[in-house]
Image: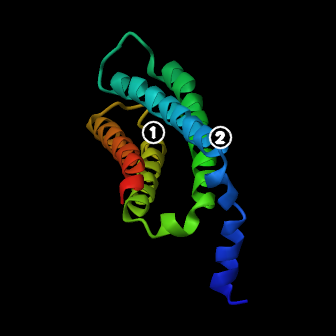
Amino acid sequence: MVRGMQERADFTAFAWIASHPWLYPLLESLHVVGIALLLGSLVVFELRVWGLGAALPVQPLARLALPLTLAGFGLAALTGLLMFASQAVEMLGNRVFVLKMTLLMVAGLNAAAFHSRGSLDRLDGVARAQTLASLGLWLAVIICGRWIAYY
């Protein structure tokens, strides 16, 4: 069998997920829960970086928010991967899906840059710009996720 055909056949092993009467809707629901955890915890932390809730120490708030953010991302990534696997060929041909994945990668790089430069210890203009970029990127990821079905 040709390599491309074999890869396509491997993905079709997950095609039953999309047609299952309750599994795909359950995955979608859990995906939304993951997004809510991720974005909710990020917004609270980012508001603190912008100066709101200045009475809250940054480090303890970050220790609370980061695990929630990572748990939300993990849940969204796992459910997203399963939904993707059920329709991989269609998704890879969908421009909005590709844009979503690109934005997701940029959001991850932005988060890595935020933490690698020690932004938790210096809430300067760069840290505020990174949090603003983070919020914009995650909102764009969510919007693209909703638009996938229409393109």
Any mark on residue 22, and which? 2
Q: Name the residue: 67% across, 67% down.
A: 12
- Residue at coordinates 42% horizontally, 48% vertically from top-left? 145
Residue 138, above or below 47? below
The image shows residue 147 at horizontal and vertical percentages of 36, 51
Q: Residue at x 47, y 41 (%)?
A: 115
- Observer-nearest of 35 and 85: 85
| Mark 2 or 1, nearer chain start | 2
Which quadrant holds residue 125? top left
Q: Give residue 132's mark.
A: none
* Residue lying at 31% horizontally and 17% vertically, measured from the top left: 52
Q: Amino acid at mark 2?
A: Trp
**Distance CA(mark 2)–CA(mark 1):** 44 Å
Q: Position of residue 7 (x, y in %)?
A: 67, 76
Q: Is residue 7 left or right of residue 94?
A: right
Residue 50 lies, in percent from the top left, at 30, 26
If the image is split into quadrants, where does the N terminus sit? bottom right
